[in-house]
Structure formats: C-alpha cells, structure tokens
Image (tube, rainbow, N blue to C red):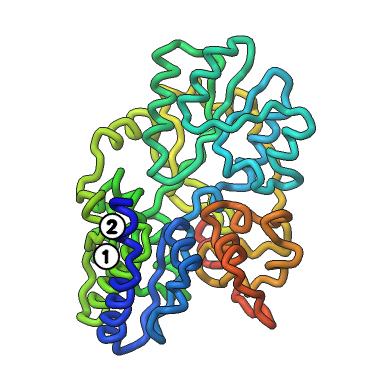
Amino acid sequence: MKYLDEYRDPVLARRLLGELTAAATRPWRIMEVCGGQTHTLVRQGIDELLPAGIRMIHGPGCPVCVTPLETLDRAMAIAARPGTVLTSFGDMLRVPGSTTDLLSLRARGADVRVVYTPMDAVRLATQLPDKEVVFLAVGFETTAPANAMAVIQAAHLGLTNFSVIVSHVLVPPAMTALLDDPDCEVQAFLAAGHVCAVMGWRAYEPIADRYRVPIVVTGFEPLDLLEGVLMAVRQLEDGRHTVENQYARAVRRDGNTEAQDAMKRVFRVTDRAWRGIGMLPDSGLELADAYAEFDAVRRFDVTGLQASEDPDCIAGAILTGAAEPPDCAAYGTRCTPRTPLGAPMVSTEGTCAAYHSAGRPPRASSGHRAPLDSLRARSAE
C-alpha cells in the first residue's frame, strides 16, 4: 500500500538500526509524546531493538488517558439525565470514571451514542429537537479544529439543544512542565506528527532553545520512528538542540493556519487538569465567551462533583514517564483491558494497553518512583 508499506520495510529498518548503533556513543533518554507512537514502538518491538543505552520514555501523549476524571464523571452525570443524549468517540466509552464508565451507564439505560465525527452530533441535534445532545470533545490540538467547526455549525443553525464538554489539552505546556521537574530524565523529544500537522512546530522552538533539548517532529510508522530517534541521537551527540522535521510529507513549520483560525475563534487557552498529573497552567482550551452558550458543564451545572481515582492506579507515573506499566502491582492482574483501573489500560493509545497487547509481563517487584510531585506542587500554587 503506497505511503504505508514503504515505511515498514525491514531492510531499511535494519539499516537505520545500524546507523543508530554507529551514531550513539553514550546513553540517551528520548521521550515520544504521542500514544500512537508508543503503540508502534511497543507493538513492533522497536524499543527493545534500539542500541544499548538508548531508552524510550513514554510520555503523556494519549488524549483519552489525560482526560480528567472529573470530566468523565461530569459526562456520566449529564448522560444519566432524562432527555439527554451523550455522544462520544468510541474510545471514551470504557474509560473508568470514579464509579463506572459510559458503556456501563448505557447498559443501564442511558442514551450514550458513538459518533465518528463531531458533525454527527450536530446532525443528531437537528434530528432530535426534543432532546439535549451533548458531545464529549476531548483530544490534543489534532481534534480541536473539527470540534470547533461543530460548534460554529451549531451556532449557524441556531441549535439550542446542542452543547459540548470541552476537555482539550495542549502539548507544549506539558513538555515544559516535564522539563521543569528536577527529576526529569528526558534529553530529547519525538513530537507528534499529527499535532504538528495542525499547529506546525513554531511553539516548540522556544522549548528547544530554553531547555537545550532536541525536538524531532516524527510520524507513526516504524521507519518514521527509527529515523526520528536517529535524528535526535545525532543532535545529542553533536551537542545541538533544534527542532527538526522527520515527517516532511505531512508537516510544515506553520501548520494548517485555517484550522488554527477555527480554534482561535471558538476556544481560548485556560489552565487544565491532566488525569494523574494535576493542574497545568495554560495547558488546555475552553469555549470563548462568544460560544459560552454551548458549554454543557455550565448548562447542566455539574461543576461540583468530587472525583476519586483508584488508589492502586499509577497512571500519573506512567503518563509522565516516571514508571512503566510492568512497574505497577496491578498491571495484568487487577488491571487488564477488560477490567481497567485507569485510562492507560483501556485507551487505544494508552501505554498500559500497548504493553499488555504486546504480551509484556509484570516485573518481579514494582519500584516505581511516585508521580511527579513537583508538577502537583506547582498545580497547587
């Protein structure tokens, strides 16, 4: 298949691994930000094939995983109300909230429906004028333009029965929060190609300069990731710290300016809580005042809920790279894709799900360090 098979060529993969072995003269620690990249690395065994000393750290790049527990609880509180239709992408249905998940709620009679685009939810609102249709809008910058366009279309149609729960998060603030932590081990980043296809990479340039870390915009296929790691290692070995673009077939420095304009029109930057991590300043999006009427949290007044994470779930440590799934005492036992304690085990981009599906066993003893306490401390300031 064109533009796919050629990025899975085993001959080229072996060549890139050979170049990596020749280029690396010391240990390096590189974080991939995207959960889709994590799944490729683990599923293909790339992380285990890298030269000795090069370690991949899995970052908070799964949008489902970092969606705050409070957001899920609010969505379920809304879905439980008579006359309400809660719409969502399918990957959110089995993510555990404080006491249940959306799929279980639907089994008990709530009207929870899977949609494939946010416009499906808008069309549903036009078809069901006697129902309140709510769309659970989560994701990084990648999904924000489409969700913004859904709100714009709803406003254009004059829909009064459509609203959204906005839980968008932004990548650059998460990267700086990680780098500000005194225990951070990350020496270079692989940036998510789909995010940069929308936003470009200008926002990453100050991060590379300030923290002196190489950042390589990378695709999602095995050869994309191997070349991205090679580019990062070469920068590290040379003492350089710039933003480079491996994903040139899809990403430009300025990104998609029309998509960015739609985002700026509908959303504004706000502080955002990340599941397992805590509140990060200026790391999320919320509806701008001009579109506040479409805010489902305000419309249904579900701001006072108290969320409760399972005490055995170490999602925060997993999402920040402080631990790996086999470090968790519940991994593969109490926590499985069928009985997940946290989002990283059930999300299609979750690190725990990637390890479990690849058959990675638990470790004999779990000695992970605690989730990044300094992040939590800063979020409380």
The location of residue 190, given as percent across then percent down, is 34, 64
The picture places residue 252, in percent across and down from the top left corner, at 21, 49
Residue type at the position of mark 2 = Tyr
* Amino acid on which the number 1 mark rests in the picture: Ala
Comparing 287 with 313, the one in front is: 313
Kindly state the secondary structure of the residue where label 2 is placed.
helix
Looking at the rendered structure, the secondary structure element under dot 1 is helix
Residue 66 shown left or right of residue 200 in the figure: right
Q: Please report the residue visible at 39 percent of the width from the left and 53 percent of the height from the top.
A: 171
Relative image position of residue 336 (x, y in whole percent): 69, 60
Q: Judge by depth and name the residue closer to the eye, 113 or 33.
A: 113
Extreme front residue here?
A: 1
Most extreme residue toward the right, as rendered? 108
**Residue, disc 1:** 208
Does 365 sit above or below residue 74? below
In this view, the residue in front, 296 or 97, is 97
Mark 2 surroundings within 10 Å by alpha-carbon count, few (fewer than 14), some (14 through 19), many (20 or more): many
- Between the residue at mark 1 and the residue at mark 2, the CA separation in whole angstroms equals 6 Å
Q: In the image, what residue occupies the spot 70% across and 57% down?
A: 341
Residue, far bottom: 25
Asked whether disc 1 touches disc 2, contact meaning CB atoms under 8 Å apart, the reply is yes
Q: Can residue 380 be seen at all in this image of the molecule?
A: no
Circle on res. 351: none
Neighbours of disc 1 within 10 Å: few (<14), some (14-19), many (20+): some
> Is residue 202 placed above or below 376 in the rendered structure?
above
- Residue 333's spot in the image, x, y percent? 74, 67
Identified at 73% across, 28% down, the residue is: 110
Q: Does residue 207 show up? A: yes
Checking the image for residue 204, the label placed there is 2
Tag count: 2
Check the image and report above or below for 164 versus 308: above
Q: Which residue is located at x 73 percent, y 55 percent?
A: 339
